[in-house]
């Protein structure tokens, strides 16, 4: 296993090992940036899609599926983490299934759709992305959109160079202890555009929600459609 | 005249008033970011277009037209500033004409093309941009691209809020005195994408040249084509 494959395996495993901690921080709203605007940003972006079923890829414990269901948008969530999907199913509000991103790439029958919207809310954390993005594109209906919310490359850069690379999230700044650090792939803006283009998609709009008091960008929301 | 029109008028006038100072800083290579990578970035981006005539909109004293000519790409430059076009014509290396952006918007016969490439190298400084961008789109050939290089919104933000707004360049940090401060419109990434989309163009690639030692992004290069 090469270092990138090893990082990817640890990334996937972390979502099972951290499932309880993650469920708690989401349900108790313990992640400040989500309260400050990124939850609202992705819900609003989904509502721009109009009616039609939405697939939430990397749905975690299911908050976005439930939120969309409450607003009349039928949604289905998939996640690699069985314990997170169990927690999602306990609350309901939509359909949920366990699937790996490789499942989505290999088998067009897994959450086949077609979907009017597919959303990846802080759930594209590996490299490369274009095989998954291509698989998602093939599940969109004729006017379908893929929405990607991710950390803002400029804000998330920190003191490290502005260069795409694997990094590690320790979750030390979170309000509850997380058992496993999570490798994740930091990606420049240019790199996001490249992965999206290679997958046969194009970016037609970008939202940059800002912090209500500091004015700093909280995230990027990329609105994509078939190129 | 409302404040935005006043800013735009001062912006246009500054390029006549600062023509000599600008010619000196470009020809003596006195702008560090240009040496550090943005000149090379736009030349390389132009060369990805393949053969075919290029229009340089806001060409100034003509360095990019000359540079492309030396590499076998026939180029034409237009600029609002008569003294800058005079300096460009003195050096030659391509065709040059005085034209305002309003001329380009109103009269399709001005540098009619069609052009295989149109380039705006740090020359989109006003607001709104979509009327000009739409006029440029209509001058592209079937496989034509519009290339826009601009300050990197995240680096150029400075201490001000991350919000599109008119600002003023004093040129105080430049190596020679400039007679006139220049109003310019600071634009977020989201705003760039919006102006481009409203003009019927789409972004298919973004380059982010970085400083060779600090690693900070020096600029954005937006590769656009008809949507």
Image (cartoon, coloured by chain):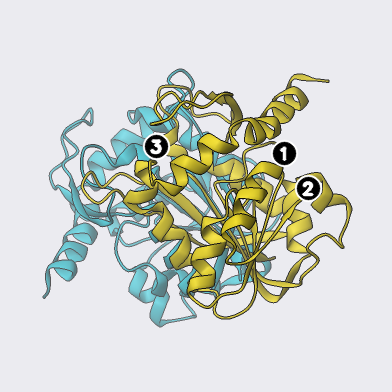
Chain colours: A cyan, B yellow
Parent chain of label 3: B
Q: Position of residue A159 (x, y in %)?
A: 21, 37
Residue B205 visible in the picture? yes
Mark 3 to mark 1: distance in Å? 22 Å
Give the residue number, with chain letter if any, for mark 1: B128
**Residue in the picture at 32% in, 62% down:** A80
| Residue B91 in which image quadrant | bottom right
Q: Residue at x 32, y 28 (%)?
A: A30
- State yes or no: discs 3 and 1 in contact (Cβ < 8 Å): no
Residue that label 3 marks: B155
Quarter holding the N terminus of chain A is bottom left
Mark 1 → mark 2, Cα distance in angstroms: 7 Å
Q: Which mark is residue B131?
A: 2
Q: Nearer the viewer, residue B20 or A19?
A: B20
User: Tags 1 and 2 in contact by the CB under 8 Å rule?
Assistant: yes
Q: Residue at x 60, y 46 (%)?
A: B123
In front of the other: A107 or B99: B99
């Amino acid at each position: 296993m090469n270092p990138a494959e090893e990082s990817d395996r640890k990334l996937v495993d972390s979502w099972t090992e951290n499932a309880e901690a993650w469920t708690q921080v989401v349900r108790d709203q313990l992640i400040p940036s989500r309260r400050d605007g990124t939850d609202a940003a992705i819900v609003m972006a989904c509502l721009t899609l109009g009616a039609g079923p939405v697939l939430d890829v990397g749905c975690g414990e299911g908050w976005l599926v439930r939120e969309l269901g409450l607003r009349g948008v039928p949604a289905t969530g998939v996640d690699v983490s069985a314990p997170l999907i169990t927690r999602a199913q306990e609350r309901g509000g939509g359909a949920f299934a366990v699937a790996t991103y490789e499942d989505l790439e290999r088998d067009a029958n897994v959450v086949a759709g077609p979907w009017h919207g597919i959303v990846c809310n802080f759930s594209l954390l590996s490299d490369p992305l274009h095989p998954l993005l291509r698989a998602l594109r093939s599940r969109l209906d004729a006017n379908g959109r893929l929405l990607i919310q991710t950390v803002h490359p400029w804000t998330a850069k920190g003191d490290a160079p502005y260069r795409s690379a694997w990094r590690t999230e320790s979750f030390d700044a979170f309000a509850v202890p997380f058992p496993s650090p999570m490798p994740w792939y930091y990606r420049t803006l240019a790199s996001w555009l490249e992965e999206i283009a290679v997958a046969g998609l194009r970016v037609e709009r970008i939202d940059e929600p800002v912090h209500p008091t500091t004015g700093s960008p909280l995230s990027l929301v990329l609105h994509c459609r078939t190129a």
